Amino acid sequence: MLGLSHGLRYHLCTAATDMRKGFDGLSGIVTNTPGKDPASGDVFIFINKPRSQVKLLYWDGDGFALYHKRLESGRYAASRHPDPSRPPRREELMMLLEGLSHAGMKRVKRYEKR
């Protein structure tokens, strides 16, 4: 089961992804990204060109899990992360999946363990 917790790291693929790709195709995209390992336990986020579908790829220890959501109408708010120098946070992913835009929002400073 795919649980989106604070302990996971999230990586957004900035290029539009062909949603016909499955486990092997998506893990191939991750493998071809320098410094990324699809079996690392991180969650990899893929969005198609019209921004109507999203896939999450996750290695849960003994195999890949894939979450796929297709919107019946509308689009996902953004296909690119606002700050590509850092991975998206869990909260930003949840907002994306729920159809909320984080453009123009400010995050209140809080303690963050690194």
Image: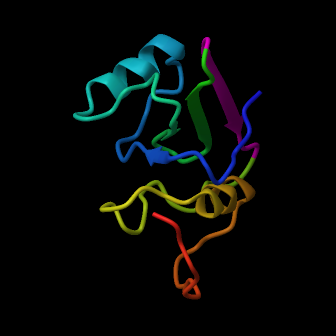
Name which quarter of the figure residue 49 lies in: top left
Q: Residue at (62%, 57%) from the top-left corner?
A: 90
Q: In which quarter of the image is residue 76?
A: bottom right
Of 69 and 57, which appears nearest the observer?
Answer: 57
Above or below residue 90? Residue 64 is above
Q: Tell whether 2 sits left or right of 50.
A: right
Q: Provide the residue span drawn in magenta.
A: 62-72
**Residue 71 part of the magenta-drawn span:** yes
Taking the spot 76% from the left edge, 43% from the top edge, the residue there is 72
Residue 11 placement (x, y as % from top left): 45, 45
- On the rendered image, what quadrant is the C terminus found in? bottom left
Q: Nearer the viewer, residue 92 or 21?
A: 92
**Compared with residue 21, is residue 9 higher up or lower down, i.e. above or below?**
below
- Residue at horizontal 69%, vertical 57%? 94
What kind of colouring is applied to the model shown? rainbow
Return the residue found at the far left: 34
Residue at x 43% of width, y 61% of height: 81
Q: How many labels does the image show?
A: 0
